[in-house]
Amino acid sequence: MSVTDVLIPPVPVVTPPFDTGMRVEIQAHARRFTDEEVIPVADELDKNKMEMPRSLIHKMGEQGYFGIMVPQEYGGMGLGVFEYCMIAEELARGWMSVASIIARAQGMGTGFDDADKRRRLLQRSARGEWIGAAALSEPGAGSDLAGVSTRAVRDGDDYVITGEKRWCGNAKAADFIQLLCRVGDPEPGQRRSAGLATFIIEKDRGGFPTGLTGTPIDKIGYHGFLTWNLEFDGLRVPAANRVTDLGRPRAGGKGKEANTFRAIEQGLNVARVHTAARAVGLARAATEECLLYLQERRQFQRPIGDFQALRFMVAEMSARVEQARAFYRQVAHLIDLGQACEREAAMVKLLATEMAVDVTGQAMQLHGGNGYTTERRVERFWRDARLTTVFEGTSQIQQKIISDRLLPRSPIA
């Protein structure tokens, strides 16, 4: 096998099952919504670290943005990862948290065995009335999710949960928390991920149930919703809330049955492409701000956009944004075709997020001293872009995933 065979796998030739005109219209609509509804709210609230208002969430629900990937029979758009990421890119141009909160619906938290309950929750999810939070990471288990220690012990018809979770965005404002925890220890010879399970903790919006407390984590960016450290001390969850189906919702039935840890890995592939799309949105927004500023700001009796050094900077920024957009759309398309794309998802997450950090940093430079104030939006884009290289797996974790799938490791002697 040649190097080319490894680095450039063949792409299947297919007839695209999509309407290009529809996609253009969806993107244009999301851009208008962002300009009219998201940006004014972000400009007012982000600098004070405030949460997005329910009124904005309600408007997003009216647009169908919480049900992009929910089948139409449940009231969703019935679209794919491609459209989901395309809309997220536009929303991130305004406020990254708005592009992020839509990931906390899309049928998440509906994996109950009770078919009627599942149907009702899918309908609520599509309307933006069933928005959750994901409790995966712990103080000692972030990149290594197989090492989670939060434990659920069966007690009659309930499970009793103890432990600690970290980096749980939107936890208090959510309608539910989807929790990854341990129900048993691996047997000799089993993978470390054996014994993991997922539970859906149903809760009142704006509070925590008995046995669960939370402390907000102060962040330098990614405002719009709070991020929490959660402590579980005897929280009781019905055994019926143990999830047996973590697959994406499909028309006419459940998602694909899967091992808990494998299902989370598959979900992370989508999340990483979604993160790439958000990173592209941030970098686009920063570049667009620069195009305006370079014509507005005057030095030496002329707009600074006349100076070749600055023109070349913004040209390079724009080219890198377009490169990352093309890549994330290609990977999203492959996922919609049913391909695993673990390596490709890691690649685009790595490329797009590192690009966003560079481009938003250049945007601040092009704004000079004005870029280092909260009077301009570029500092917000820079703060939020910096996080994209960390969550959903750091850039170094993406490099590990990619290299492990390109190069076999030598056996240890």
Image (cartoon, rainbow, N blue to C red):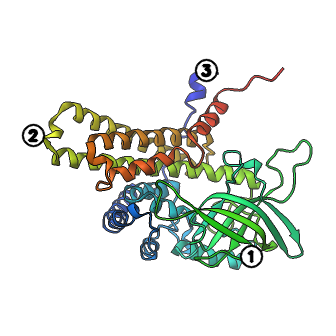
Q: Residues within 10 Å of mark 3 (few under 14, many from 20)?
A: few
What residue sits right under mark 1 in the picture? 114
Residue 170 visible in rendering: yes
Front position among marks 3 and 1: 1
Q: Residue 41 falls in which quadrant of the image?
A: bottom left
What residue sits right under mark 2 in the picture? 302
Quadrant housing the N terminus:
top right
Does residue 394 appear left or right of residue 165 in this picture? left
Residue 333 visible in rendering: no
Q: Residues within 10 Å of mark 1 (few under 14, many from 20)?
A: few
Q: Are marks 1 and 2 in contact (CB under 8 Å)?
A: no
Q: Residues within 10 Å of mark 2 (few under 14, many from 20)?
A: few
For marks 3 and 2 on the same chain, the one whose residue lies earlier in the sequence: 3
The x, y position of residue 371, in whole percent, is 30, 47
What residue sits right under mark 3 in the picture? 2
Indicate the amino acid at tag 2: Arg
Helix, strand or loop at label 2? It is: strand
The x, y position of residue 126, in whole percent, is 54, 72
Indicate the amino acid at tag 1: Asp
* x 57%, y 52%: residue: 271
* x 32%, y 43%: residue: 363
